[in-house]
Amino acid sequence: MSASLMQSSSCTMKRQVVTNMTAALRFRIDSETFRKNQNVDLEFANSICKCTLNQDTSTPGIRLRNPIELTKGDYELVVTARASKAETFFLWVYDSDSNTRIGGTLHIGSETEKLALGFSLLQTTNVEIGVLAHRHEIGDSCEVEFVEIKQEATFERAVKPISLEPNQGFRSCKQRTSKLVFLLTGTKLVIHVR
């Protein structure tokens, strides 16, 4: 599979290298592109993968067969999927170089939905992606219909100053240096870019 876009369905590579990505990198949903993570059954049909769990420990699921190399920048892992049980399956991004999970935990719901998990790379990095499960039982399942990585536009702070404003339980205080500081007393912070 070419690392630019899904252009060829007949060739595969041990490692995909993505440089200067200007469009989305879409992955075919098939057994040549994705593999099992631990003890699961994967059924591929009509460009959909149904992942059924055969274990009730650790983090089983579906993942790319091989890591991809992404350059420094901001990205989104975009997945369309649905799970048999909400709060069980989640989008997974893993830095193979440092053996560290990156990005947050974004759960897949029980209705088909398109989710986007943002992550940033400070340098060129080998990345693995997938859909894994936690807090699960044997027999839980997830259907994955669409997977892609998109590079996001990066705004330099010198070009776009950031203005922070308090919202819902935040308290601000102005210092003599004209620097605005927020003290966290709530759960939400609104950032406006002007």
Image: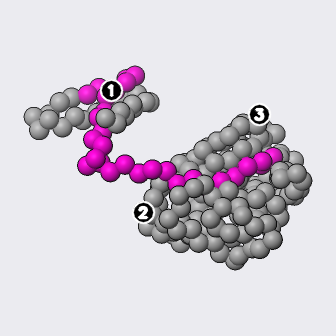
> Disc 2 on helix, strand or loop?
loop
Residue 52: x and y, percent? 85, 51
> What span is in magenta?
143-172
Color theme of the render: one colour
Q: Which mark is residue 122?
A: 2
Residue 174: x and y, percent? 17, 30
Query: Pointer 1: residues within 10 angstroms few (<14), some, or many (20+)?
Result: some
Determine the residue positioned at 72% across, 64% down.
7
Mark positioned earlier in the residue sequence (1 or 2): 2
> Disc 1 on helix, strand or loop?
loop
Outermost residue on the front side: it is 7
- Please tell me whether residue 87 belongs to the stretch shown in magenta: no
- Which image quarter: residue 191? top left
| Residue type beneath disc 2 | Leu
Which is nearer the eye, 59 or 157? Answer: 157
| Residue type beneath disc 1 | Pro
Mark positioned earlier in the residue sequence (3 or 1): 3
> Disc 3 on helix, strand or loop?
loop
Residue hosting label 3: 111
Residue 157: x and y, percent? 29, 48
Q: Which mark is residue 127?
A: none
Count the marks: 3
Query: Pointer 3: residues within 10 angstroms few (<14), some, or many (20+)?
Result: few
Residue hosting label 1: 166
Pair 1/2: label in front: 2
